[in-house]
Image (tube, grey):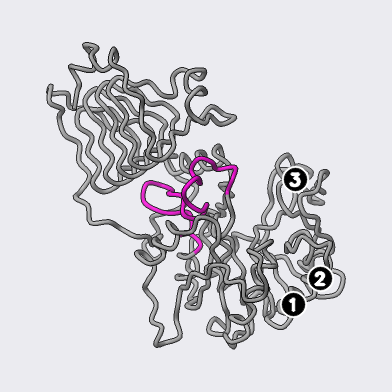
Amino acid sequence: MLDKTLAIILAGGMGSRLHPLTSDRAKPAVPFGGNYRIIDFTLTNCLHSGLRRVLVLTQYKSHSLQKHLRDGWAIFNPELSEFITAVPPQMRTGESWYSGTADAIRQNLYLLERSNADYVLILSGDHIYRMDYAAMLQFHRDQGAGLTIACMPVPIASACSFGIMSVEDTSQIREFHEKPKNPKPLPNDPHHALASMGIYIFNMDLLCREVQADHALTASSHDFGKDIIPGLIKTHCVYAYRFGGETGRVTPDRYWRDVGTIDSYYAANMDLLAPVPPLDLYQPDWPIRTYHGQNPPARMAPGPLGCEGQLVNSLLGSGTLVSGGTVRHSILFPQVQVHENAVVEDSILFDGVHVGAGTHLMRCIVDKNVRIPSGERIGVDADADANRFVVSESGVTVVPKGYRFPTNANKANSPVAQLFKY
C-alpha cells in the first residue's frame, strides 16, 4: 500500500501571523527547537512511515525552504522511483499562483496522474508532531473510505480556529464545519470539540475528480476545508482517524501543535524544556532528521574576566559558545555566542546570534545573525521594546533577522560597554 501512495506537503503559505520570522522565509522553513526547521517533522513522519515519494508544493519566499530540502533531505534514490521534490507554481493550467489548498493540487494533477498511485496523502508542512502515516493508511483501506481525515480533540475555546466535525460510533463523519463561530462539542465532553489536523488521505480518482469540479465553481475559495470536504460528506464515505493511537513504531505522545502565531510558536519551543517534554525527540528509532552544519561542539567557557557563567535547563545547538554568560530556560541554535555577564532567560536565539557582555534578554526571539551590543536590555521594558520590535500579545519580543542596533556614542563609551567590549 505504501508504494501506491503519493505524499503531498502543502508548504506555500505566507505565515503572516508569524511575522517577522516569515519576512524572508516560508513558514515551514522557520527554525524550531534549536536544531530543526518546522517542515522536518512532517518529512520525518514520511520517512519513518515508509513513504518514499513526496512532493513539496512551495510558493511564498521559498528559497530558504528549497535550500533546506536540498541540503538536508536529498536522501532518496531516484533510480528506485524515490524522491522528495519541491514543486513551485508553474502556471501549467493558467496564469495564477496557487489560490487555495485544493487549487494547489489541481495545478499539479499531471504529477498525480503520472505517479500511478492509488492513494494521495495530503499534509501541511507547518505543524509540529510525530505520526505514523502507515497506520492511518491501513485504517483508510480497512474502512473502504474515499477520504480519511486525521482528527484530535481541542479545547472548545480554541475550536473556532479549526475544521470541526461530528462523527458516528463507526468513525464516519456526518458533519464538517470549517472554523465555525459556535463549535459543536463532543457528545461526552462539553469542553472539547473534534478538530481536523489538516491531514487527508484521498483515493486518487476521487481527489482528481473533486479538485477539477471545484475549479469550475466561480464562488469557491478552492479550499479543502471550506469547499470540498463538506460536500463529500454527503456523497461519499468520509472517515475520521483519531490521532495518537497509532500501532506503528512511533511512541504515541499525542502531541500536535499548529505554530501559526508568535505565541503558539514560542510556547511549542518552550514545551521542549519541560521536565518531561510532551513531544518525544529522543525515541532512538524515530529521530527527527534535519540538516546539520559542520560546527564544533557547543562549549561553556570562562569569560575574559574569569566569570564561569551558568547553564540551566536549556538546549544548545552545535558551535554555540557561552563565555562567562548565564543561560536559563532558553533555546540556542548553532553558532550562538553569549558573552561575559550576559543573561539570557526564557528566550530563543537563532543561528549566529551574538549577545554582548552585560546584556539582558528575557522572553525574546532573536532571528539569525543579530549582533546585540553590550549592555542592551530586551524583554525587560515592554514600552521600549514596542517602539522598535514586534511584541506579541503575551509579551514575547521578536528581533528580526539581521537587525542592526543604532550606534549610540554615549552608550558605546559608557563604563559598562567599555568593560565588556568584544
Quadrant containing the C terminus in the rendered view: top left
Q: Earlier in the sequence, mark 3 or mark 1?
A: 1
Q: Does 98 appear above or below 21?
A: below
Q: Which residue is mark 3?
A: 160
Q: Does 110 appear above or below 197?
A: below
Q: Which residue is mark 1?
A: 146
Q: Earlier in the sequence, mark 2 or mark 1?
A: 1
How many C-alpha atoms fall within 10 Å of the one at disc 2: few (<14), some, or many (≥20)? some
What's the mark number on residue 232? 2
For the record, the magenta segment spans 15-42
How many C-alpha atoms fall within 10 Å of the one at disc 1: few (<14), some, or many (≥20)? many
Q: Farthest residue toward the right?
A: 234
Q: Earlier in the sequence, mark 2 or mark 3?
A: 3
* Residue 252 horizontal side relative to residue 419, left or right: right
Estimate the x, y position of residue 99 in percent, counting from the top left: 68, 61
x 73%, y 64%: residue: 224
What kind of residue is marked 3?
Cys
Estimate the x, y position of residue 116 in percent, counting from the top left: 59, 88
Q: Are marks 2 and 1 in contact (CB under 8 Å)?
A: yes
